[in-house]
Every structure is written in structure tokens, then in C-alpha cells.
Image (tube, grey):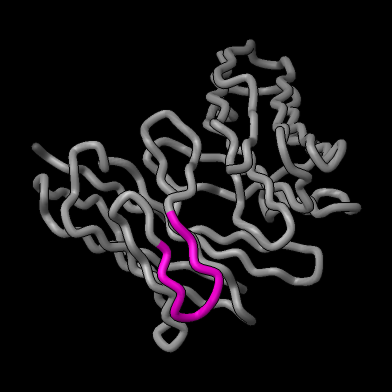
Amino acid sequence: GAVVSQHPSRVICKSGTSVKIECRSLDFQATTMFWYRQFPKQSLMLMATSNEGSKATYEQGVEKDKFLINHASLTLSTLTVTSAHPEDSSFYICSMCRVNTEAFFGQGTRLTVV
Amino acid sequence: GDSVTQMEGPVTLSEEAFLTINCTYTATGYPSLFWYVQYPGEGLQLLLKATKADDKGSNKGFEATYRKETTSFHLEKGSVQVSDSAVYFCALIRHSGSARQLTFGSGTQLTVLP
């Protein structure tokens, strides 16, 4: 099946610094990309969606200036958590869809802000 | 908007027991339906899918049938194993032109005891 590579898998950063998470499709072009956040023992919370040729659409309550999403190409999306704080610590997961198929997920990134 | 409602957990079963996790949805048009599985500390993996009414998705002993008349996609397995312990997410993707709307249920934690 299609492969989505997400890295880093784990990152620890100091409060106030920025962290970039990369999500790349290895063998297909993604028309739509999603970024999710997951708290312990909870479901996935959609942060933003970006479709081909459009800027990311953020969900209500998600600060777009804090969580910068760049849909750089049909195979690459990045999420940058700017000026991270301990409350941003979470598990972040990317997902990519290609035309008329299911969504493929990255392995997730465990972010810890200290 | 679209929504997915799935059975609340946690669900605890003994090995070889029968599993059912209920999932119902509301969506306009003709969405594709999916079950994803998440093992501890990992991203999501596609378990099975169905893209049209009456389709049955199956994989690793799990099955689910797309029932348009009841707007349901219940997950079943005849005999669970300890290795099936994970969180299971029901999801739908609705296609609208080039855009994709991906909606998840809240997830159901399954624990299988030996």
C-alpha cells in the first residue's frame, strides 16, 4: 500500500522554541492532506485540511499563526509549532489522501515541550 | 456536517470471544467508509474499507458491511486474539470535487485478555 513518512517520531524541545514536523508521501501524490492532534486516550482532533492548490483550512479553535501548515508540494506537508509551550505537548499525526482512495497516515510525532 | 458515531469503550474481551464495534454515520452523498486501527504509540493503519453500499470490507479476520439503509458500518470479528488489543476508529471520506472531507469516530479501546 501507499506509504506516508512522518518525522521526527519523537522530539523534545524547550519552551519558546519552534518545531517542524514533516510528512511525506513516498509513492503517490496527495491531493488532500490533514493534520491531527491526539491527546492521551482520546480521539483524533482535526487541526487543518489542505487541498491541492489551496491554503490550509484550519478548524475552529486552532491558531493558524501558532500551527503553521505548509502544503509544499503534492508529496510534502509540514507542520511548524511556533513558540511551543508545554500545553502543546501532544501526539501529532499527518494524513494524506490521493484521488478516490482512503487516507494514509504517518507514524505520528510525539512532541514534548519542557 | 458529516459525523461518525461509534460505540464507546473501553471494550474488554477474553481471547476467542466474538467482537462487534458499532459504527453509524451521517453524511451527504455517497461516502467511503473505513476502519482504522491504532496500536499503542503508533499512527493509524487502515484495517478495511468499503466504497459503496453493500460492499463488505475484510482483513485479518475482521469484517464490516456498508449498510446504506441503516447508515452503519459495524466491525466484527469471530474470534479475537490478544494481539488485536488496540484502539479502533471508524471513519468516512466524502469526496466533493477535488476536496476530501475525512471524519472520524471517537475511537473504541479494545483489550483482549488471555
Seen in the picture, residue A55 relative to B18 is either above or below; the reply is above
- Snapshot quadrant of residue B23: bottom left
Q: Is residue B54 magenta?
A: yes
The residue drawn where x is 39% and y is 72% is B65
Q: Is residue B88 left or right of residue B77?
A: right
**Residue A46 at x, y = what percent?**
61, 50
Q: Is residue B83 left or right of residue B12?
A: right
- Snapshot quadrant of residue A69: top right
Work out whether residue B63 or residue B113 is closer to the camera in this orientation and state it: B63
Seen in the picture, residue A81 relative to A16 is either above or below; the reply is below
Question: Please, which residue is most extreme toward the bottom here?
Answer: B69
Work out whether residue A24 or residue B26 is closer to the camera in this orientation and state it: A24
| Residue B105 visible in the current orientation | no
**Residue B54 at x, y = what percent?**
44, 80
Work out whether residue A69 or residue B14 is closer to the camera in this orientation and state it: B14
Q: How many marks?
A: 0
Q: Is residue B111 left or right of residue A37?
A: left
Q: Quadrant of the N terminus of chain A?
A: top right
Q: Quadrant of the C terminus of chain A?
A: top right
The residue drawn where x is 13% and y is 50% is B13
Q: Is residue B71 left or right of residue A96?
A: left
**Residue A6 at x, y = what percent?**
64, 28
Q: Is residue A22 magenta?
A: no
Task: Give the magenta part as a residue range.
Answer: B48-57
The residue drawn where x is 43% and y is 51% is B47
**Residue A12 at x, y = what percent?**
58, 13
| Residue A64 visible in the current orientation | yes
The residue drawn where x is 44% and y is 75% is B66
